[in-house]
Image (tube, helix red, strand yellow):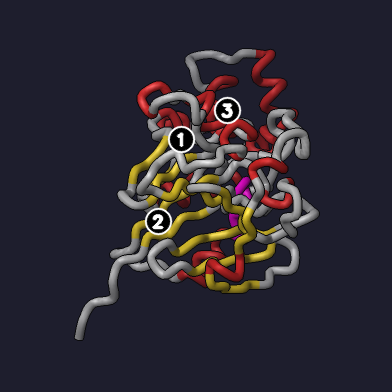
Amino acid sequence: MEATPSRRIVIGDVHGHYDTLLRLFDAIAPNERDGVYFIGDLIDRGPNSSQVVDFVIKNKYHCLLGNHEQMLLDAVGRGGVSQQLLQSWLYTGGLSTLESYQHHIPQEHIDWMQGLPLYLDLGDVWLVHAGVDPKLPLAEQTAEQCCWIRDEFHQIYRPYFADKLIIIGHTITFTFPGIQPGKLACGPGWLDIDTGAYHPKSGWLTGFDVTNRLVYQVHTSSKSVRTLPLDDAVTFVDPGMVAGKRTKKRGLFG
């Protein structure tokens, strides 16, 4: 009997929703041959960020640096505490993370976050939290672009890579014009799988089986689970409709 082929599974922004993440894993049922990749933003806003981080570390899953991990590191993980950056982080969801750690983040978790990569190249797919600056070569992309960028990337008319699909999170998909809550969003050469697990307008946490083009989703509030072919789960975004149609304020949607 032939062994089941390994799958590549990408998980969208969890934002501290540990119970929802466990239900998603029950639905996906990854095995030891599967590659599991988190797109970043494990923490903030939801109630159990510490458990989410612990789960990813203990299972040795791959994870990217998200803007919320970066905010935590900037505030408390660089050898001291910046009061200005601490207040900014707490305002954008960090308070729930701090409470989940009982106000003491273990050095092991901080060290792990400091080692997270900005992107991962899987051959035909390329993972990054927010996107890239289309005007810059890959070697010049920094955390500012990879963790924070929005419109400049979403407005591209030609794929950044000729032979790779860029998979992102960071921007909740319903904030794009014409995208319904829970739907994935795609543009030229990119696919956004952040369906807003923490947001009351959506509540869906998404996992994408790249190998089989299947989308798994669990709803944070209703606990409902669904599995859809990618073609039924995604809506195309017109790059020309992005500018000015969504708030640019950092942290509000990602």
Looking at the rendered structure, the secondary structure element under dot 1 is helix
Looking at the rendered structure, the secondary structure element under dot 3 is helix
3D distance between C-alphas at marks 2 and 1: 19 Å
Total marks placed: 3
Q: How busy is the neighbourhood of tag 2: few (under 14 within 10 Å), some, or many (20 plus)? A: many
Inspect the image, locate mark 2, and give the three-letter code of the amino acid beneath it. Answer: Val
229 or 196, nearer to the observer: 229
3D distance between C-alphas at marks 1 and 3: 11 Å
Q: How far across and how far down the image is residue 100, in percent?
A: 63, 41
- What label sits on residue 36 in the rendered view? 2
Disc 1 designates what residue? 109
> In which quadrant of the rendered view does residue 240 lie?
top right
Disc 3 designates what residue? 72
The residue drawn where x is 73% and y is 58% is: 181
The residue drawn where x is 70% and y is 50% is: 198
Mark 3 in CB contact with mark 2 (< 8 angstroms):
no
First of labels 2, 1 by sequence position: 2
Mark 1 in CB contact with mark 3 (< 8 angstroms):
no
Mark 2 in CB contact with mark 1 (< 8 angstroms):
no
223 or 216, nearer to the observer: 216
The residue drawn where x is 74% and y is 35% is: 252
- What label sits on residue 2 in the rendered view? none
Inspect the image, locate mark 3, and give the three-letter code of the amino acid beneath it. Answer: Leu
Report the mark closest to the observer, 1 or 3. Answer: 3
Quadrant of the rendering where the C terminus is positioned: top right
3D distance between C-alphas at marks 3 and 2: 23 Å
Q: Give the magenta part as a residue range.
A: 14-20
Inspect the image, locate mark 1, and give the three-letter code of the amino acid beneath it. Answer: His
